[in-house]
Amino acid sequence: MPMTYRTAESPEAGIKSCRYAYWGVVLTLWGTMALTPMAGPLAVHADQEQDPLVTYKRGYVTAKLAEGGRAIQIDGVTYGMQPDIVITDQAERPVTVLDIASGVKVFFHLDSAGKIDRLLIWIPS
């Protein structure tokens, strides 16, 4: 004896149940997305530090000037250096002014007076 399944009494009842299922799924997805924070990967919150290299200028050393080691030429522009300048390589190891060679890629930060207060030497690995 073949099995028979009971169907809805009217075709409209079956369509109604499909509509309810559809809207149930739609509302569930909408609710999930509404409750999910929308912070993208590029969003920087106030309590997080921004990547320092984003605010740095970059260039190549074209010359070191003799002003007591307190001036450097980057891409043909001469910049003075603060007496308390911090010079490091990309691994945050200290570097001296004597270690800076011509043609080296650098990232630098200028203070309000236009002098370099932070210099990062990019040493290829």
Image (cartoon, grey):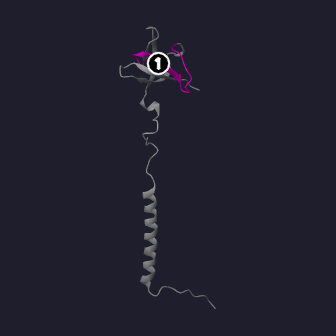
Q: Which residue is mark 1?
A: 85
Identity of the residue drawn at 45% across and 39% down: 47
Could you tell me which quadrant the C terminus lies in?
top right
| SS state under label 1 | strand
Identity of the residue drawn at 54% across and 18% down: 95
View extreme (bottom): residue: 1
Percent coordinates x, y for residue 120 in the rendering: 49, 23
Depth check: 93 or 46 in front?
46
Percent coordinates x, y for residue 38 in the rendering: 43, 51
Identity of the residue drawn at 43% across and 21% down: 117
Q: Is residue 124 left or right of residue 48?
A: right
Identity of the residue drawn at 46% across and 65% down: 28
Q: Is residue 26 above or below residue 51?
A: below
View extreme (left): residue: 113
Q: Is residue 110 above or below residue 23?
A: above
- Looking at the image, how many numbered discs can be counted on the residues? 1
Estimate how packed mark 1 is, as few (under 14), some (14 to 19) or many (20 or more) residues with alpha carbons within 10 Å: some
Whether the magenta-drawn stretch holds residue 34 is answered as no
Q: Which residues are magenta?
A: 74-97
Depth check: 59 or 8 in front?
8
Depth check: 45 or 26 in front?
45
Percent coordinates x, y for residue 35 in the rendering: 44, 57
Q: Is residue 3 above or below residue 31?
A: below
Percent coordinates x, y for residue 119 in the rendering: 47, 22
Which quadrant of the structure image shows residue 124?
top right
Whether the magenta-drawn stretch holds residue 82 is answered as yes
Which quadrant of the structure image shows residue 33?
bottom left
- Under mark 1, the amino acid is Ile
Which quadrant of the structure image shows residue 1?
bottom right
View extreme (front): residue: 47
